[in-house]
Image: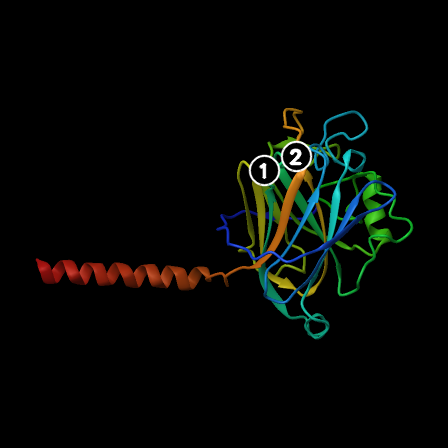
Amino acid sequence: MNRKLHKAIVGILGTVALAASSHANALGVAEVDLGTFTGSALAGTSTAGKKSWADSISGSNGFGWVHTGSTFAKLQVGSAAQIASGATVNLTIKMTAAATNGIDNPAFSVWTSGTSDFNLSAGGFGLHTYSQVRGPADGGVSDNASLGNIGITDFIGYSNSGGSFTNGDGDAVGAGGVSSSPWVSAIASSWASGADFSSLTLSGLKSGYYLIAAGGSCFDGTCAAGSSFNLEVTAAPVPVPAAVWLFGSAMAGLIGVGKRKRSA
């Protein structure tokens, strides 16, 4: 990969669900419009194949495999005025298996078209396979260039609750990663995953338009056959700068020493 990934630990927040529109295109890809995030929680439901985010079969080679049924969600972050001014937000994207027929090993990737809107239904979006960890101009699997046909420019990050593997580009795909893209300004951005969820927290994310590819991560072929999931976007807390955290820890230590001296 030609973008540095930053690793950290993330806490998971609660969500409030809102309706999201959905339909399928000619490739069988579900298109979900999550709406505009301005601080209030957003959510949508959809289905995807158990191997749609990662499949090891010939023809897929460890990439996302649209033919097994994928969901692509559109998210606008910020109002038109916030997009124009370059305002930043802190948010968490979380994918969770549904209670009934829930997808096994949920995983997703995020890209951006920047401040320009994109159309998932635009002609030329002939995406059959895709790299989970690269942008349309980062080289690798040629189908990723199709993301550029609808205006996508940069890779943002991913979260994967399935096992680690190496895709057909030779990229190591683990539990998650956040790109050093100029659209994410805080290295506190991070990810987390469990048996039935994956999440990505993006700190200092610029207002703009984002594409989320969600599906099942089943590189080893041992996943259950469920397909339903929930996709949520919620506000995330402002990350505490390392210097402030260290100062607070030092002060707590001094207070503790003072108390011990007084009790001696």
Residue furthest to the left: 264
Read off the residue under disc 2. Answer: 217
Say which label, 1 or 2, has the lower sequence index.
Answer: 1
At horizontal 59% and vertical 66% (from top left) the residue drawn is 39
Q: In x, y percent, where is residue 80? A: 73, 72
Q: Which mark is residue 161?
A: 1
The quarter of the displayed image where residue 36 is located? bottom right
Query: Which quadrant is the N terminus positioned in?
Result: top right
Which of 99 and 110 lies nearest the eye of the viewer?
99
At horizontal 85% and vertical 41% (from top left) the residue drawn is 27
Residues packed near mark 2 inside 10 Å, few (<14), some (14 to 19) or many (20 plus):
many
- The three-letter code of the residue at mark 2 reads Ser
Which of 234 and 156 lies nearest the eye of the viewer?
234
Q: CA distance from mark 1 to mark 2?
A: 7 Å
Which of 262 and 56 lies nearest the eye of the viewer?
56
Residue furthest to the right: 123
Q: In x, y percent, where is residue 195? A: 54, 36
The quarter of the displayed image where residue 248 is located? bottom left
At horizontal 84% and vertical 42% (from top left) the residue drawn is 127
